[in-house]
């Protein structure tokens, strides 16, 4: 399984995805269909942390007055399942590894993966 979770309206997702040949990948647009609990559980198997999958830059944090420091693992999971904007993106997942988010080291590791 090779899957990318992304937002079609996100210029960062589009920029990163455009660097790679994704013809053999399943593209999963989050706004049209939010991540399922099963999919999130699969991602968790790689990260062992819902917090690692949570976008602390989400506009929803401020809008909902969420104190991120007080959140526990189950809170991160619940929020991600509740609203697609809480999932850090893009997420590239293969059978063996995961690449979460858009920080420089993650994108560099993706480039190495695509070799």
Image (cartoon, grey):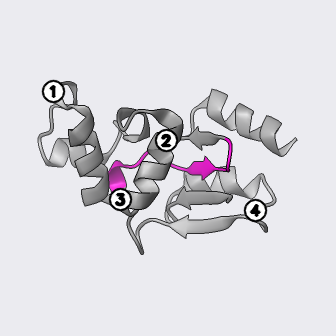
For marks 1 and 4 on the same chain, the one whose residue lies earlier in the sequence? 4
**Snapshot quadrant of residue 25:** bottom right
Q: Whole-Å distance between the Cαs marked 1 and 4?
A: 38 Å
Q: Which mark is residue 22?
A: 4
For marks 4 and 2 on the same chain, the one whose residue lies earlier in the sequence? 4
SS at circle 1: helix
SS at circle 2: helix
Q: Whole-Å distance between the Cαs marked 1 and 3?
A: 22 Å
Give the camera-side residue of 94 and 111: 94
The residue lying at 27 percent from left, 34 percent from top is: 73
For marks 1 and 3 on the same chain, the one whose residue lies earlier in the sequence? 3
Q: Which mark is residue 37?
A: 3
For marks 4 and 3 on the same chain, the one whose residue lies earlier in the sequence? 4
Q: Do callouts 1 and 4 mark residues in contact (Cβ within 8 Å)?
A: no
Is the residue marked by circle 4 packed among few (<14), some (14-19), or many (20+) residues within 10 Å?
A: some
Q: Which residue is mark 2?
A: 45
Q: Is residue 62 above or below residue 36?
A: above
Question: Where does residue 61 sit, x and y in percent of width and height?
Answer: 22, 42
Q: Whole-Å distance between the Cαs marked 2 and 3?
A: 12 Å
Start and end of the magenta stretch?
85-96
**Relative to residue 61, is residue 7 drawn left or right?**
right
Q: Whole-Å distance between the Cαs marked 4 and 2?
A: 23 Å
């Amino acid at each position: 399984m090779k899957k990318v979770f992304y937002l079609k309206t996100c210029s960062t997702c589009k920029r990163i995805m455009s660097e790679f040949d994704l013809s053999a990948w399943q593209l999963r647009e989050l706004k049209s269909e939010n991540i399922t609990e099963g999919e999130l559980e699969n991602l968790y198997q790689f990260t062992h942390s819902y917090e690692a999958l949570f976008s602390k830059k989400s506009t929803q944090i401020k809008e909902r007055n969420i104190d991120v420091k007080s959140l526990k693992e189950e809170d991160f999971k619940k929020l991600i399942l509740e609203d697609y904007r809480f999932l850090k993106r893009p997420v590239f997942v293969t059978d063996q590894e995961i690449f979460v988010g858009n920080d420089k080291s993650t994108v560099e590791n993706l480039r190495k993966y695509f070799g």
